Image: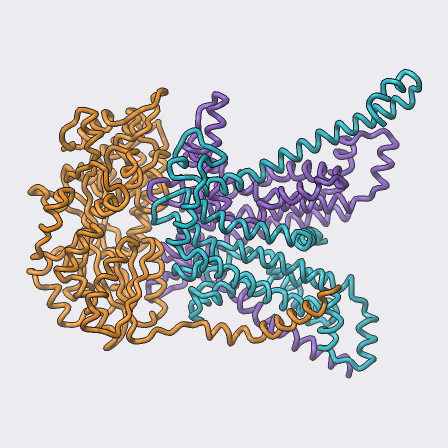
């Protein structure tokens, strides 16, 4: 009873509120001034780098304000898709892998680079043709190459020593044999430290990407070009069987790893796994989180993924110019050396002397001084690439949980055939399938 | 009656002993029920107790086996780390702003619409009411994607307004207030006011609203918690670090970054405690509100 | 004249609410139905009408079918776990209404329903943790081998059912307590005079008389079970190093199709399937209630 008036007052206000809500909605829209540059990144660890680049631009652009928004990759890709299709406010520098950017280029959602930037990127002294190709389409340049994701083996040298191993494994057979020796077990024989950490669970395409890297060592691929812009799966074969069987053997036969064991960089840093395959950023991560860890890196047996990431600029007219300047400034030798040293992602620009960093941190050698004939592959630049990888990943998770596959080649083949057919269905649906 | 006297009486009067036995049996049964309910209650609360306890553990203790329940050497390092590394307070602020505004909007729209539907029996209105009621069964998840594009075209993504768009009205709220209007506001009262020359709006403000206080209070608590615990909608609407609600912030805190259960727990505990406190304070309102959801007849 | 004036007031007063309602409810619902018939990809410029092609594709999409099966199992699993437990606990709390502890029981059992989903799921994630979790500690203490709860295809679904039931229980108990309070006392007194024991009158009186409430709670539980998302998301969110098995549920598959694969039309057709399921459940509830009314 006592707060009757109060309640009535609140409700009156609420009444007005409901009537006025339309106006309020509009006032919520934000505006971005021309002097502001937004940088969208899909790697949180890259944020300091972009801020460093912005600092360096202070001299030329004293009033420029750079807002770096670095979030998890998947969320980043979502905001790019929704931002680009819905009219982006202000100038935004967008970090995207070449394969992801393609579908935006196909739909004219990202502008072509201005002439001077285009010349800079096309100059073979600056970038290898592989990189300038992934930054463009149909001979035109749309992005500025920056860094690449490239895999190598990380191994814990203390654990290797304890297991009597002196060098990194060189063939996939050795990987399995090493994993068996490196696995530490508790009294019941259950693995407590995995010999070789593999990506076996979780949501999303990572599982398929990692599988692809392993299969690449056997000469297989999830997708290969089939000419005329068409694609076809290439894993329902011997390479696919060998790669999958290696996973299954490690899980079910030698029991060197289980899906629920801690995995990835985290586990490696905490000494919960002896070796795993990952990109160069782990070097920076280890330096930050486990500086005392004794480890080394080694190139993979046959070759690695090379996933180039470029900077694109969304924005119009004169405002966009500063965006392109930012992309170019990010590629200045000083900044790239800073990137390698502090973040650990591999810069793509050639003709820069990285030895100041690589000589001090031998772990980079496996990424830079790879053997002759080392074969790189990259993700195809097609729209449904993520859907395809996600679906293959979902299939793989089922296979990784099926002990009956481990010893039955016919079953493995049937499984691969099924997954391959599913990939074909998606390709056909999108008009990308080979006849 | 003490237990000693029982021994005395038992051999004397059969009826009396029967009564005592029954009473003892009843007491034993009640005791067993209490034990059972206490165990159930503790089990229900246990996960939350674990969470709060984990928040105070050191990283080493987090990884120890067997797991401990009460932290051996409690630390607040997790809390300071979380508060330093994430805009946790900002996320909580976003959640509160969103929940409060949603509550106001829902209470306002439900009060008006419930009153009109309850006391103004025109055919047009009856049809409208049926429409409101029919959409109540459609889960939010079914239409949130088109709604997302509406929010986008209004340019209100990543803002409290965008969050609010999904939580402006509540079909059940309208239904609840309508039931209350029908049952607790006599037509005679309104007629008398009209004869006295009161305007319709005045009647609503000064007669109807005060009478609906209890129901609106219950609805408000319900609406608040509905927005406070919302997940799927904030997850797609708020995608910048500064616009996350606490639910989304916490969920994304563990993806893309290192998992550190101690810190995660600290962040979670920080969120948990105010909402539990709020619930305990508003329990009566809340129970009334929730209970009324079950009376759809 | 007066009537006309009142009519105008009513329409004017309802108009703002109606406008909001039309904009945030009716329009998006209609739009979902419309989009489900289009190949509406966020990124492509032409978004052609494809009729029922999306639905045909759904029928052969094993991820969607997986999600449908998982979601159905979760929804019914929660139902089977929650309803009997809620009924018994509510009966016992009602029995002890006058005890000082009644308020505590109610609060304790209800708190999981109001705490935010994500922190709650975090707590359970630790409980289920294969290496460090207290659940496995308890199991090994009793000599039962530890299980990898969040990774096994069957166990990971059970984990979600347990988590959802934990949250749903409080609501069901509360509704049942209200139901018990509304039951006629005289009937129980009569039963007592006839020599019926507590459990007997619970079985032969309470359960039949609470049937409409059981029906209502069941449908609410089922519908919210079909909308499960946050629980699956948090239990399996793929943080590096400690992911769990992704239990695919409908809402998750829907969001993935629209925001990762950018196939909004396809996702809308999934939403329509979800809508049909929920409508069917509600219709069943109504028809059962009506039947009861006739009998």
B224 vs C105, left or right, is: left
Name the spot of residue A258 as percent of width and height, x first. Answer: 34, 31
Q: In the depicted view, which residue is nearer to us: B249 or B131?
A: B249
Q: Quadrant of residue C44?
A: bottom left
- For this orientation, the residue located farthest to the right is B13
- For this orientation, the residue located farthest to the bottom is C1
The residue positioned 21% from the left and 59% from the top of the image is A310
The residue positioned 48% from the left and 57% from the top of the image is B92
- Residue C208 is at least partly visible in this image: no
The residue positioned 80% from the left and 82% from the top of the image is B197
Name the spot of residue A146 as percent of width and height, x first. Answer: 18, 58
Q: In the depicted view, which residue is nearer to us: B229 or B35?
A: B35
Chain in purple in the render = C
Chain in orange in the render = A
C41 vs C283, left or right, is: left
The residue positioned 47% from the left and 74% from the top of the image is A26
Query: Colour in which chain B is shown?
Result: cyan
């Amino acid at each position: 009873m006592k707060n009757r008036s109060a309640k009535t007052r609140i409700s009156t206000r609420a009444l007005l509120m409901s009537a006025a809500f339309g106006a309020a909605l509009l006032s919520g829209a934000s505006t971005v001034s021309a002097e502001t540059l937004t940088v969208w990144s899909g790697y949180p660890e890259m944020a300091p780098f972009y801020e460093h680049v912005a600092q360096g631009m202070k001299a030329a652009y004293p009033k420029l304000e750079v807002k770096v928004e670095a979030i998890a990759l998947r969320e980043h890709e979502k905001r790019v898709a929704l931002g680009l299709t819905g009219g982006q406010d202000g100038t935004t520098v967008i970090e995207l892998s070449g394969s992801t950017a393609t579908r935006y280029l196909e739909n004219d959602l990202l502008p072509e680079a201005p002439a001077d930037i285009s010349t800079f990127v096309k100059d073979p002294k600056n970038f290898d043709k592989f990189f300038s190709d992934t930054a463009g389409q149909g001979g035109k340049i749309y992005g500025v190459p920056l860094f690449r994701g490239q895999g190598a083996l990380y191994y814990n040298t203390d654990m290797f020593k304890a297991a009597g191993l002196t060098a990194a494994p060189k063939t996939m057979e050795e990987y399995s044999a090493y994993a068996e020796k490196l696995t530490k077990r508790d009294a019941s024989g259950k693995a407590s430290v995995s010999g070789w950490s593999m990506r076996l669970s979780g949501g999303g395409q990572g599982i398929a990407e990692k599988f692809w890297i392993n299969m690449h060592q056997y000469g297989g691929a999830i997708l290969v070009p089939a000419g005329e812009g068409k694609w076809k799966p290439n894993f329902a074969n011997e390479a696919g069987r060998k790669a999958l069987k290696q996973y299954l053997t490690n899980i079910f036969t030698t029991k060197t790893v289980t899906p629920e064991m801690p995995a990835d960089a985290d586990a490696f840093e905490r000494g919960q796994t002896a070796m795993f395959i990952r990109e160069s950023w782990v070097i920076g991560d280890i330096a930050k989180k486990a500086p005392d860890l004794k480890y080394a890196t080694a190139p993979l047996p046959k070759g690695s993924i090379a996933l180039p990431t470029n900077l694109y600029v969304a924005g119009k007219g004169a405002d966009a110019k500063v965006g392109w300047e930012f992309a170019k400034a990010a590629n200045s030798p000083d900044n790239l050396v800073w990137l390698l040293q502090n973040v650990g992602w591999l810069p793509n620009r050639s003709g820069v002397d990285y030895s100041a960093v690589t000589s001090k941190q031998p772990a980079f050698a496996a990424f830079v001084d790879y053997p002759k004939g080392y074969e790189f592959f990259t993700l195809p630049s097609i729209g449904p690439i993520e859907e395809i990888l996600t679906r293959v990943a979902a299939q793989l998770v089922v296979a990784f949980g099926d002990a009956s596959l481990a010893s039955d080649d016919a079953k493995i083949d049937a499984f691969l055939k099924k997954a391959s057919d599913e990939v074909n269905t998606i390709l056909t649906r999108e008009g990308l399938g080979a006849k | 009656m003490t237990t000693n006297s029982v021994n005395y009486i038992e051999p004397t009067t059969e009826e009396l002993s029967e009564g005592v036995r029954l009473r003892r049996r009843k007491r034993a049964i009640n005791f067993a029920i209490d034990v059972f309910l206490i165990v159930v209650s503790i089990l229900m609360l246990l996960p939350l107790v674990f969470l709060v306890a984990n928040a105070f553990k050191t990283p080493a203790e987090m990884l120890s086996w067997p797991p401990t329940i009460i932290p051996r050497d409690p630390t607040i390092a997790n809390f300071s780390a979380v508060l330093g590394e994430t805009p946790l307070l900002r996320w909580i602020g976003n959640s509160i702003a969103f929940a409060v505004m949603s509550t106001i909007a829902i209470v306002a729209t439900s009060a008006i619409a419930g009153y009109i539907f309850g006391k103004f029996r025109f055919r047009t209105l009856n049809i409208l009411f049926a429409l409101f009621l029919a959409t109540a069964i459609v889960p939010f998840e079914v239409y949130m994607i088109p709604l997302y594009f509406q929010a986008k075209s209004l340019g209100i993504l990543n803002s409290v307004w965008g969050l609010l768009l999904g939580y402006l009205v509540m079909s059940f709220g309208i239904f609840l207030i309508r039931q209350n209007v029908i049952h607790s506001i006599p037509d005679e009262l309104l007629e008398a006011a009209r004869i006295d020359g009161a305007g319709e709006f005045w009647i609503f403000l000064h007669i109807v609203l005060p009478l609906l206080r209890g129901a609106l209070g219950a609805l408000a608590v319900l609406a608040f918690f509905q927005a406070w615990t919302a997940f799927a909608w904030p997850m797609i609407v708020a995608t910048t670090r500064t616009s996350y609600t606490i639910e989304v912030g916490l969920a994304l805190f563990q993806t893309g970054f290192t998992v550190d259960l101690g810190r995660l727990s600290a962040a979670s505990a920080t969120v948990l405690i105010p909402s539990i406190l709020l619930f305990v304070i508003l329990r009566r309102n809340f129970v009334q509100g929730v209970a009324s959801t079950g009376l759809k007849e | 004249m007066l009537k006309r004036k009142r009519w105008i007031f009513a329409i004017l007063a309802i108009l703002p609410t109606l406008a909001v309602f039309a904009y945030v409810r009716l329009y998006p619902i209609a739009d979902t139905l419309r989009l489900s018939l289009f190949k509406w990809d966020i990124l492509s410029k032409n978004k052609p009408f494809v009729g029922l092609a999306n639905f045909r594709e759904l029928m052969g999409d094993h991820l969607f079918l997986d999600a449908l099966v998982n979601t159905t199992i979760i929804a019914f699993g929660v139902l089977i776990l929650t309803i009997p437990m809620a009924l018994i606990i509510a009966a016992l709390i009602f029995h002890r209404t006058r005890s000082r502890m009644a308020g505590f029981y109610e609060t304790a059992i209800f708190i999981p329903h109001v705490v935010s989903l994500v922190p709650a799921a975090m707590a359970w994630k630790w409980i289920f943790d294969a290496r460090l979790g207290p659940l496995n500690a308890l199991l090994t203490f009793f000599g039962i081998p530890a299980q990898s709860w969040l990774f096994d295809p069957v166990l990971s679904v059970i984990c979600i059912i347990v988590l959802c039931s934990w949250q749903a229980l409080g609501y069901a108990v509360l509704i049942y307590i209200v139901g018990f309070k509304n039951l006629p006392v005289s009937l129980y007194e009569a039963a007592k005079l006839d020599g019926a024991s507590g459990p007997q009158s619970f079985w032969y009186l309470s359960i039949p008389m609470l049937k409409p409430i059981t029906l209502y709670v069941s449908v609410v539980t089922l519908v919210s079970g079909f909308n499960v998302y946050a629980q699956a998301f948090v239990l399996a969110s793929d943080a590096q190093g400690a992911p769990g098995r992704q239990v695919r549920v409908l809402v998750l598959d829907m969001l993935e199709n629209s925001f990762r694969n950018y196939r909004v039309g396809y996702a809308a057709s999934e939403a329509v399937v979800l809508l049909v399921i929920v409508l069917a459940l509600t219709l069943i509830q109504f028809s059962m209630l009506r039947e009861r009314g006739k009998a």
